[in-house]
Amino acid sequence: RSCQGSDRRTGPVPAQPWLGQPHHHRSGQNRGSDPAAKLRDLFHTIYFLPYVTNTLAVGLVFMILFKPTAYSNGFANLILGIFNIMPIDFIDGPYWAKMFVLCFYTIWVVMPFKILILTTALASVNQDYYNAAKVDGTSDFKYLRRVMVPICKPTIVTITILKVIECWNSYVWPRLITDDENYFLVSNGIQEIRENGFGRENIPAMMAAVVVISVPLIVLFLLFRDKIMEGVSRGGVKG
């Protein structure tokens, strides 16, 4: 009798994988017919395109957007004209206008990779957490602050550290935004030493300086190595 009861309890188990197949199939069909999912995928594609596009092609796009021609003042000024705003010379005009173009370019080209990592981590959070939070009457903002952010904390730390490393090693950006040597970063300082002749005459000292400015980044990586690895690998785990 106990064996029959055991068989009775375990009998339906082998059928569960077969029963689960139509469910997944329907889920895929619902996602394919969901307009929001299609728009979200389209947005991700458009947003990520500048990161994988050749720099010259991106430069041509920005020339169309901001550079005045014999036919128009640029697409950006065309948009401003709709709101009765006077045309702005974004290329040779005021300092703030040129900084706007540079910041816009940096955000458009640099940020997609980090946004991709973050959105992948957010998408990997189990949907059951959201459903349970809604049952308890939790608002979306509170769910984001109390559930999503703590779960994705390793990814956020990873993105922050990668950005700090990128800024520390930045050479071109300080040269573009200022001519004041007081605002140059360490990479610019090393290049200035080389151009002044000291680095060319004393190669060992130059190499020692390069090692010294690399030490903070190495220490930073060693301190947060586990967080970085966890944040990078989290994007590949679903649920």
Image (tube, rainbow, N blue to C red):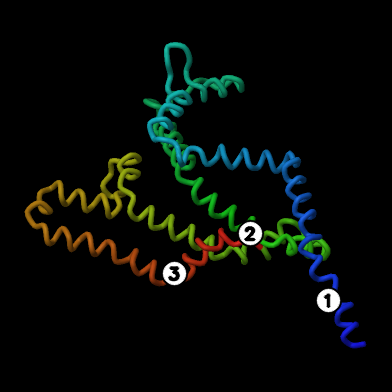
Is 80 situated left or right of 53 in this image? right
> Badge 1: few (under 14), some or many (20 or more) residues near its Cα, within 10 Å?
few
Q: Residues within 10 Å of mark 3 (few under 14, many from 20)?
A: some
- Name which residue lies at 56% across and 55% down: 118
Q: What amino acid is at disc 2? A: Ser
Q: Is residue 209 left or right of residue 175?
A: left
**Callouts 2 and 1 close, C-beta under 8 Å:** no
Residue 106 percent location from the top left of the image: 44, 41
Q: Name the spot of residue 226 as percent of width and height, x first.
A: 47, 71
Q: Which residue is mark 3?
A: 224
Q: Disc 1 residue type?
A: Thr
Comes first in the chain, label 2 or label 3: 2
Which residue lies at the image location 53% right of the left edge and 54% below the top edge?
117
First reached walking from the N terminus: tag 1 or tag 3: 1
Q: Is residue 96 left or right of residue 172?
A: right
Q: Secondary structure at mark 1?
A: helix
**As shown in the figure, which amino acid type bears the numbered disc 3?**
Phe
Q: Earlier in the sequence, mark 2 or mark 1?
A: 1
Quarter that holds the N terminus: bottom right
Q: Secondary structure at mark 2?
A: loop
Compare residues 25 and 184 and report the one nearer the observer.
25
Residue 208 in picture, x, y percent from top left = 18, 63
Q: Residue at x 26, y 49 (%)?
A: 188
Instruction: State the SS at label 3.
Output: loop
- In front of the other: 27 or 145: 27
Q: Residue furthest top?
A: 71
Q: Which residue is mark 1?
A: 10
